[in-house]
Amino acid sequence: MTWRIIYSNDVENFIQKQNVHEEVREELKKFLLKVKGENINIDLKKLTGDWIGYYRLRKGKLRIIFEVKKAEKTLFVEKVDFRGDVYR
């Protein structure tokens, strides 16, 4: 079974406006390769506080916040935005 990536409506709008679909997809692919055990260097952080249970990927000034549902093999991308605006 392959992994599914689901984007929230806000993420889809941001990706279209900023034209960053490829960057987001590539970073999520790298994360999945890391989950499978490959030695890939990515800037990944497990979040706390209001975002407990979510992860943050960083690519330059871009931040990708997502939830991993291993049982369903699904990544739910909650938010994508630039640094400083993403956690609001």
Image (spheres, rainbow, N blue to C red):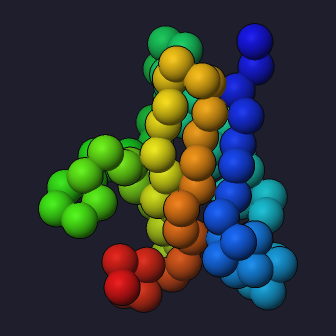
Q: In which quarter of the image is the N terminus?
A: top right
9 versus 43 height, above or below: below
Q: Position of residue 9 (x, y in %)?
A: 70, 72
Q: Where is residue 6 in the image (x, y as percent from the top left)?
A: 70, 49
Find residue 79 and report its horizontal and vertical position in percent. Answer: 53, 68
41 lies left or right of 51: right
Task: Specify whether 56 is left or right of 6.
Answer: left
Image mark count: 0
Q: Which residue sits at x=25%, y=52%?
A: 52
Q: Quadrant of residue 22?
A: bottom right
Observer able to see residue 38: no
* Identity of the residue drawn at 52% across and 19% down: 71
* Left or right: 11 as drawn, with respect to 88: right
At x 54%, y 35%, the residue is 31
Residue 19 visible from this viewpoint? yes
Query: In the displayed image of the protein, which residue is found farthest to the left?
Result: 49
Q: Is residue 44 above or below residue 70?
A: below
Establish if 60 lies above or below 7.
below
Taking depth in this image into account, of 79 and 43 the one nearest to the observer is 79
Indicate the quadrant where residue 88 lies.
bottom left
Residue under the image location 16 percent in, 62 percent down? 49
